[in-house]
Image: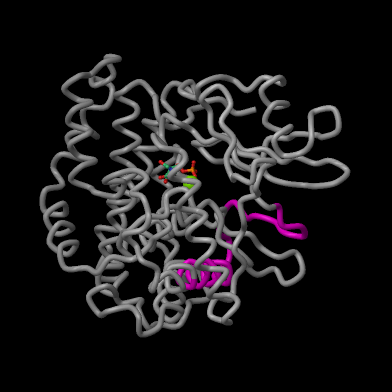
Amino acid sequence: MKKNKHMSKVVNRDILNQVLLHFGCSLNNSTVAPLGNGLINQTYLVRNINAVFVLQCINKNVFKSPEQVIDNAELINEHLLTKKSLNNYPLESISQLLNNDKSPMVIINGDYWRAIQYIPNCYTVESVTTTEQAQQVGTAFAQFTAALSDFPAESLAEIIPDFHNLSFRIKQLRAAINKDGVNRLDSCQSIVDFCLAQHDFINEVATITSQLPIHVTHNDTKINNLLFSSNTKKPIAVIDLDTCMPGYLMHDFGDMVRTCCSNLPEDGKNIDDMSVRMDIFTALINAYIVSFGDKMTSLEQESLIIGAQLLPLMIGVRFLTDYLDGDNYFHVDHHEHNLDRAKNQMHLYKLLNANKAELANMINQPVQTEEATV
Ligand code: GN1
Ligand code: MG
């Protein structure tokens, strides 16, 4: 089982059993296995003779009001189900299950648990290897946000305020630098200096942000947040609605670029070997624009290139801040894990920033067959 030191407790069998009883089963008649690679929540697959479902303990350190995460998911699912019934949403929506008290949430010892429908004959993909997969990622997340374009965004709770606000993330970094609570500043001074020197880009982001329309965005658009059908090998659902909030299209697109277009994982250490997979980028951007259709304004289209640079910088700043804070937020496997991630994402930002003109030229281009790198 993966552990975060900030998770309230390591889950013991007694607690797990109490939670299961609320969903009509117990540890006596069920198997419970860890599921997925998320850095934040604890997720399990529960199987028994009557049911298979996903069980999740929501991380209270990250999600200060876990009930809002659950309420938002209910509202979004309801909207998507309506769209689907009108043939206006091609994917499935995944429901949260009601417990014995007809509520989607169980609170045990102050921890918030929920059960989520398990879809059989599906699989997840950890990283993009083909341009076809990149097209599928761009298309599925565009369909998701487009289907929510007439959803009243103001009815959603802002789960994590300023989640993708770069100026705010830089402020958090400055606070961590000033505190230097675990004496790590010396070991990352040069990367700190690099982040704080990005004024021009920070201003560019602030200027375009003030002109962009708000959408309900997913804010964690990795390929492993899609469920693929074992039959068709195509995405059938967008999952992990935890950070669905009012936001900008460039955030979702930028997160796709940062998680799909690097040849290295986000914690890969051999950053001198990093390259941007231009064929994947071309497939992503064109699928995203085409699938959104005329709902995307020309300024939003332009903003996608800024988003592609913004998200690696944003998460790089977040990883660096967590490193300076002593690893309180993200799960880490080793002492320098957050620093490795920060260096990796900052390098990706540099590569994307240095090649933004070439990236912009990829809009409306056919997908290249051979791998080009920048
Ligand atoms: C966290 O736990 P996971 O993988 O769903 C984080 C994302 C980061 C990601 C980096 C709520 O998501 O913003 O991009 O780690 N989620 C939150 O791997 O902070
Ligand atoms: Mg997530």
Q: Position of residue 36 (x, y in %)?
A: 62, 42
Residue at the (29%, 66%) spot, across then down: 305
Viewer-closest of 301 and 364: 301
Q: Position of residue 195 (x, y in %)?
A: 20, 40
Q: Report the span colored magenta.
A: 118-143
Q: Position of residue 65 (x, y in %)?
A: 41, 37
Q: Is residue 45 left or right of residue 57?
A: right
The answer to which quarter of the image holds residue 326 is top left
Q: Is 3 situated above or below 238?
A: above
* View quadrant of ligand 1: top left
Q: Does the segment drawn in magenta span residue 119?
A: yes
Q: Is residue 1 left or right of residue 213?
A: right
Q: Does the segment drawn in magenta span residue 280?
A: no
Q: Is 114 situated above or below 72?
A: above
Viewer-closest of 36 and 74: 74
Residue at the (80%, 47%) spot, across then down: 51
